[in-house]
Image (tube, grey):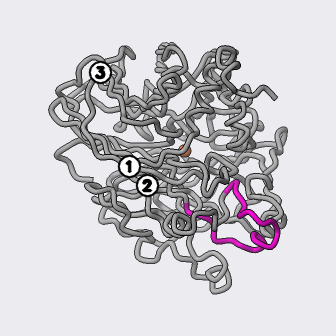
């Protein structure tokens, strides 16, 4: 294996930078940021919240998977050209316990407790890493992790106020299951529509289930819908259109007995069943109605870009890889990220009533991830999408561009960050009062490997020209998702 020591930095600068970004961050700060390039747009006033992995080890032991990193929130306050930054770890009960113990006490998605079988067998209370995304609904700021409950956070101090179960709607009612795993999963990709919040969770077991949630505009969760699935799968995201909910179930398999017995971590129990078809479930959005099932070619989508109703058909678009790219451990990533991590093309799936097969078409030329659209176009016909990405066939297979997809002209605009820089999810912020769908800004946290520091970039969403840049006082390990909250509006 190529080791990413100093000598290999020239050969694979992005892989070297990615490996360097995985260093733990312990520091929590609350500080103004100086603009060191360009000028903050005067109309950019609001709060950018982001979630991600603050640290990837405990007591000298590196976590087994990037998804096990301890959740850390960041908040950037934009006010009349000034920017203030605060970061704070989620004080989950697991974080507090492990911090006190100075060692790994909980299992994770890709991490077992040191000590082998005796320490891990039948231990189903996994660490809630609270690290994947952050949303605000009905004034409540929630840090999300797909395997368990959200955490409620004070938006001013970023203090963790506790687990949030929507008045026990997310507490398992079955007495035996409640003893083993009392908290229901709430995915990190809920969708907003008409003031309500829609989400899902997946329950593993002999009869795997999809749990469907709807939280109304007053913040009250309705009865949980349960759909029994034909097979175990791995679903990270879904699509909500004006009339439908779409879940795409890729062909993956969990070796549940080995994972339950603690012989392997959940991620090590996963195996790709590439070649087998993907199943697609289309459900009505609100009114009760029949489930419709489709089959699609094998593939794996972490993130859906968007989707919309097209007559009776439903169109969904996401970044589709050939198979699930989950295997690499943090130690492997620190040594040398595998080439081809990013091989995921923008793919359109059309689901037409009366047919059993989904039709697919992919856009060649670019790979992407962490997509965003204008918030008012979510679930509706749209023209533009933004993402991180790289050109098909680029040597290192890591994302060093921000991309803008124009679905009408089939054009892709790109901005490459020079040197050993890796951008994060570009949050799209519409310009107040704008009419055009691409009139606004992109806010992306970019890791600079040379300086070992993260910088917040503001780009023009139409042209991808850099408007402004602010350097943080430290680096941040890879983050996942965030959102923009304009000032002077409710949640
Ligand atoms: Fe995600």
Up-down relation of residue 130 to residue 339 (above or below): below
170 and 362: which is toward the camera: 170
Residue sticking out furthest to the bottom: 175
Q: Are marks 2 and 1 in contact (CB under 8 Å)?
A: yes
289 and 488: which is toward the camera: 488
Q: Earlier in the sequence, mark 3 or mark 1?
A: 1
Up-down relation of residue 174 to residue 152 (above or below): below
SS class of the residue under badge 3?
strand
Residue 448 belongs to the span the image colors magenta: no
SS class of the residue under badge 1?
loop
Disc 2/disc 1 C-alpha distance (Å):
8 Å
Q: Earlier in the sequence, mark 2 or mark 1?
A: 1
**Residue 289 position by quadrant:** bottom right
371 and 380: which is toward the camera: 371
**Which quadrant of the frame does ligand 1 lie within?**
top right
Dominant secondary-structure state across the stretch colored magenta: loop
Find disc 1 in the rendering and name its residue. 28
User: In the image, what residue occupies the spot 80% across and 55% down?
Assistant: 269
SS class of the residue under badge 2?
strand
425 and 194: which is toward the camera: 425
Find disc 2 in the rendering and name its residue. 89
Residue 111 belongs to the span the image colors magenta: yes
């Amino acid at each position: 294996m190529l080791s990413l020591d100093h000598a290999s930095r020239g050969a694979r600068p992005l892989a070297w930078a990615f490996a360097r970004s995985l260093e733990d961050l312990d520091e929590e700060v609350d500080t103004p940021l100086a603009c060191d390039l360009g000028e903050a747009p005067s109309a950019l006033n609001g709060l950018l919240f982001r979630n991600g992995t603050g640290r990837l080890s405990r007591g000298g032991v590196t976590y087994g998977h990037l998804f096990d990193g301890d959740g850390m929130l960041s908040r950037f306050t934009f006010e009349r050209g000034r920017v203030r930054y605060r970061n704070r770890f989620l004080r989950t009960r697991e974080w507090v316990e492990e911090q006190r113990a100075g060692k790994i006490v909980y299992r994770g998605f890709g991490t077992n407790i040191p000590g082998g079988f005796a320490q891990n067998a039948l231990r189903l209370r996994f660490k809630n890493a609270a690290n994947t995304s952050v949303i605000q609904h009905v004034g409540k700021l929630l840090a999300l992790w797909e395997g368990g409950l959200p955490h409620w956070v004070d938006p001013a101090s970023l203090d963790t106020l506790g687990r949030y179960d929507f008045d026990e709607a997310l507490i398992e009612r079955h007495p035996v299951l409640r003893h083993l795993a009392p908290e229901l999963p709430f995915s990190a990709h809920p969708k907003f529509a008409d003031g309500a919040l829609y989400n899902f969770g997946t329950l593993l077991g002999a009869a795997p289930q999809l749990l469907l949630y709807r939280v109304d505009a007053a913040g009250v969760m309705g009865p949980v819908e349960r759909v029994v699935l034909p097979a175990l799968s791995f679903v990270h995201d879904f699509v909500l259109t004006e009339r439908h909910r779409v879940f795409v179930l890729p062909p993956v398999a969990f070796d549940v007995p080995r994972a339950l017995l603690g012989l392997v971590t959940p991620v090590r129990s996963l195996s790709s069943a590439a070649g087998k078809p993907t199943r697609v479930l289309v459900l009505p959005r609100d009114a009760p109605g029949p489930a419709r099932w489709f089959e699609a070619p094998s593939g794996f989508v972490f993130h859906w870009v968007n989707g919309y109703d097209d007559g009776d058909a439903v169109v969904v678009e996401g970044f589709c890889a050939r198979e699930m790219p989950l295997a690499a451990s943090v130690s492997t990533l620190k040594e040398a990220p595998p080439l081809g991590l990013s091989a995921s093309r923008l793919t359109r799936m059309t689901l037409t009533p009366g047919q059993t097969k989904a039709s697919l078409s992919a856009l060649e030329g670019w790979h992407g991830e962490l997509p965003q659209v204008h918030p008012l176009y979510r679930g509706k016909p749209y023209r533009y999408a933004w993402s991180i990405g790289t050109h098909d066939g680029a040597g290192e297979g890591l994302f060093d561009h921000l991309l803008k997809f124009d679905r009408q002209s089939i054009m892709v605009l790109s901005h490459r960050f020079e040197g050993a820089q890796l951008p994060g999810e570009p949050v799209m912020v519409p310009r107040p009062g704008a009419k055009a769908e691409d009139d606004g800004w992109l806010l992306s946290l970019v890791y600079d490997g040379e300086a070992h520091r993260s910088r917040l970039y503001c780009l023009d969403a139409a042209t991808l020209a850099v408007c402004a840049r602010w350097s943080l006082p430290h680096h941040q390990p890879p983050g996942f998702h965030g959102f923009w909250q304009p000032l002077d509006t409710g949640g």
